[in-house]
Amino acid sequence: MRINRLRLAATVLALAALGLVGAASKSGPTRFGQVDDARIANAAKEPQNWLVHSANQAAWRYSALDQINVDSIKDLKVAWTVEFDTDRGQESTPIVVDGVAYVSTTWSKVYAVDAKTGRQIWFFDPKTPGEAGLLACCDAVNRGVAVYKGKVYVGTLDGRLIAIDARTGKQVWSTMTVPENETYTITSAPRVGGGLIYIGNAGGEFGGRGFVSAYDAETGKKAWKFFLTPGKPGVKDGEVSDEIMEKVVQPTWFGPYTDYRGGANVWGSLIYDPDLKQVYLPTGNGFPWNRQFRSDGKGDNLFIASIVALDARTGKYKWHYQETPGDVWDFDAVADIVMLDLPVNGKIRKAMIHTPKAGYAWELDRVTGKVISGVPFVDGVTWTSGLDPKTGRPIMDEAGFYDNQNPVRAPGFAHSWQPTSYSPKTGYLYLQASQGPPGLFTPTPAPYEWLKGIDRRGIYRYNTIPPETIAKQPPPPPNPVTRRSFLLAWDPVKQAPAWKTDANGGGVLATGGNLVFQGQGRGSAMGILNAYRADTGQKVWSVNTSNGISTGPMSYMVDGEQYVLLATGTAMFPPIATDVRARQKGVLVAFKLNGKGAMPADPPPAPPFKVIPADQQWPAADIAWAHETFASFCARCHGDGSRNNNVVPDLRRSAYLTSAEAWKAVVEDGALRDRGMIAFYPRFLPPGGAEKLRGYIADEARKAIAAPAAAAAPPPTPVGPPTEH
């Protein structure tokens, strides 16, 4: 009997090695990532799977499964959890194929787990260098993988596109998609279609030209590359974008050419259209934000804040629509594009709907790029008074543009990268939306100085504003728009809200059970997963999670049981939090009806502020210098005065603060470079600069001990709106 059991075990292992045994016993044999174009095109026939990033190629992020519904959801409980190996932010959407879940984590790592039990099948670490974190705007996050023809594809923070064997977790090929030693990162999920893998990049806060490239799924060989802002006039790139750059894009830019100006990075969602064999590129902000420094204060600056359509096979330009001409407010157009067939004047048109930061719900014809409609989906949109009825171009409020001296107030972000969802049952689009009093944009004075690796945007953010500049700041408007964040159900046919319910959350999932799921706790130590009726917005279920939630859930089925799955883990953005906890690992959490699992324990409070002996004092001039230096180089990650949510360490609580030698080892010598804390000396700091910074943080720790209630308060210095890349 013992021998027979051994033989049986050996047979099972051999079959597993050949990819013939499924991760879940009753769900049948898995083919480990055998997803092709035909299967993706018919994703609606496989609601038990989640084959692509947004569930289908139309990016509906909708699951037809209805076992979990408004009646049964009272019994929804934790089924299983998987703890990741990193305590940084988690923004990935898992892919589930034939009982196996593939999910990426911070630092571009990838897990394959049994979708029924959470058992790890394999783990892949691309060994992303910690230095890459310096160029990540808002944490070293990764938003997901693609699965295609037996491979799992992931973009790494340092710019590689890697193909992984879906069965073994071994690397098949790797290609560097960005120029090495330049200011690019990848945080977005690759997209697939027509035998190619499409990947964009981030970096629009640091300088350089955004672009998208496509690679052969089997070999990793580059198929095409399309730049989105112009290079040096008269110099061709030798890429498919050369002609359109010269004829259409270059004339919209002014002033002297520089190596750093550009932007329009596709750091959010791009989308593949199988009907028209096109890809749509939603582009980001220009760099620098201040148009005075990037384009002599004028010009539309194509293709920033635009949607660009390309031939998916060749990369050839098809059409574009610029949502925010000449953008100076960081109105990235990177939100999810959702493809719909919409009735327009009695005819069905192949359309898309887009709801980006700028606050407009745009409906465009996917064939021509012409505007079908465009209306605000939040109150307080003041940068435009509407769209030109003939051209569809926004009618800009020229008073909203700031120059080198005069600040302005402009609306905040209506909706950023957090995933949207569309339900064919209700006909509604669901998204997180925000409105509020206008934010202040205060320009830095000329001349502009770019510093490679530092996010100098041409406006003040954490930097101390000189008194003469503060005197010029406009007061808040007398009747500001009521600040509100809400989950919005938008009717794309009526072009109006169907319902709103107060919520300040992340991405969403709609299901056939008449439910919309959304997590909360973005930027906080703790989180909540809520469920609402999809038809009315009534909240019907809620559960606390031991980690904040930024991304959206997804759903699948194994062995006749429906699951809701999401990655939890707070990113370093936004930096301010009142409930500061000890650093904790990210967690993948699966729910099912009558689940028997348990949520991890809540993290304890963060360590106390460090007490610095009274005999350790620093000259006031050194602390003043360090305050400005910290604002310029450190506050982007650690927050002004190091007020933050402790995902990136609150330095006032750091054990290194009490030792000059240990502090120097980290700040000057790069002892923690593998975790993203590079050596700032001598690249950015003069001799002795690290010790002056220690004095400044020690002073901030003393203030926090003396006035605990103010320790987590936002800084008093007016700053521009945050960025989420």
Image: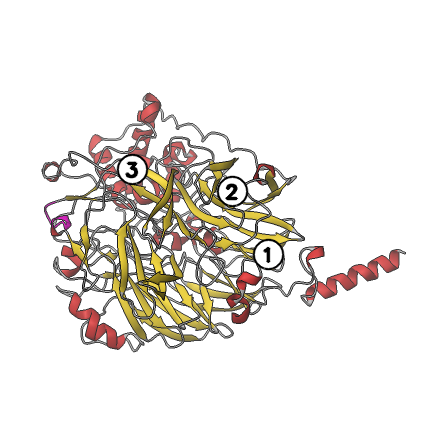
> Which range is magenta?
399-406
The numbered mark, 2 or 1, whose residue comes first in the sequence reads 1
Residue 314 lies, in percent from the top left, at 37, 77
The numbered dot on residue 640 is 3
Q: Is residue 85 visible?
A: no
Q: Is residue 481 left or right of residue 33?
A: left
Side of 436 relative to 75 (left or right): left
Circle nearer the viewer, 1 or 3: 1
Please identify the residue farthest to the front as the structure is shown. Answer: 346
Camera-nearest label, 2 or 1: 1
| Residue at mark 3 to residue at mark 2: CA–CA distance | 25 Å
The residue singled out by tag 1 in the image is: 48
In front: 634, or 611? 634
**Could you tell me how far apart the alpha carbons at marks 2 and 1 are, in whole angstroms?**
29 Å
Disc with the residue nearer the chain's start (3 vs 2): 2
Q: Is residue 549 magenta?
A: no
Disc sitting over residue 585 in the figure: 2
Q: Position of residue 686 (x, y in %)?
A: 25, 46
Amino acid type indicated by mark 1: Gln
Tell me if 187 is positioned left or right of 234 in this view.
right
Crowd class of label 1 (few under 14; some 14 to 19; many from 20; radius 10 Å)? many
Q: Position of residue 481 (x, y in %)?
A: 23, 37
Which image quarter is the N terminus in? bottom right
Q: Are marks 2 and 1 in contact (CB under 8 Å)?
A: no
At label 3, the amino acid type is: Asp
Residue type of the residue flagged with mark 2: Lys
